Amino acid sequence: MATVDQAQDVLARHRAALLSRTGVVGVWVGLGPDGAACIRVGTERPACSVDPPLPDEIEGVPVLPENVGPIVAARKGRP
């Protein structure tokens, strides 16, 4: 089981590769259902549409996709 610090180190090494996948809109370190540190991957559609597919783990740290939908920047001054 990885610590949050270890998961952050792993994410730092793999952030660019994860974000370069079609369908990935964000990555962060979070906690999995078991309370252990994991790499969370925000996707704009279901994870099965990410290309290339996401791994189950990276360097022993679990990777958990989360369908967050598309992320759109708001224009300045818009509520």
Image (spheres, grey):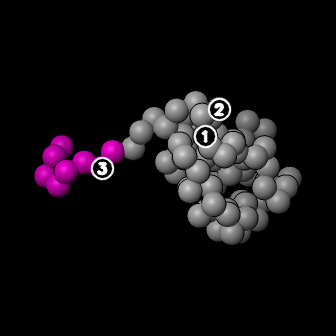
Give the percent coordinates (x, y) of residue 40. 63, 47
Magenta-colored stretch includes residue 70: no
Q: Answer whether labels 2 and 1 touch (C-beta < 8 Å).
A: yes
Left or right of 58 on screen, residue 21? left
Residue type at numbered disc 1:
Val
Q: Is residue 14 visible?
A: yes
Look at discs 1 and 3 and give the one toward the viewer: 1
Q: Nearer the viewer, residue 71 or 53?
A: 53
Q: How far is the residue under mark 3 from the one under mark 2?
A: 25 Å
Along the polypeptide, which appears first: circle 3 or circle 2? 2
Numbered mark located on residue 73 in the image:
3
Span shown in magenta? 72-79
Q: Which residue is drawn at 52% across and 32% down?
A: 45
Q: Is mark 3 on a helix, strand or loop?
A: loop
Q: Which residue is drawn at 78% across and 55% down?
A: 58
Give the percent coordinates (x, y) of residue 73. 30, 50
Q: Identify residue for label 1.
A: 50
Along the polypeptide, which appears first: circle 1 or circle 3? 1
Q: Residue at x 79, y 49 (%)?
A: 57
Q: How far is the residue under mark 2 from the one under mark 1?
A: 6 Å
Q: Residue at x 73, y 51 (%)?
A: 37
Q: What element carries label 1?
A: loop
Residue type at numbered disc 2:
Cys
Q: Identify residue for label 2.
A: 48
Q: How many labels does the image show?
A: 3
The kind of secondary structure the magenta stretch mainly shows is: loop
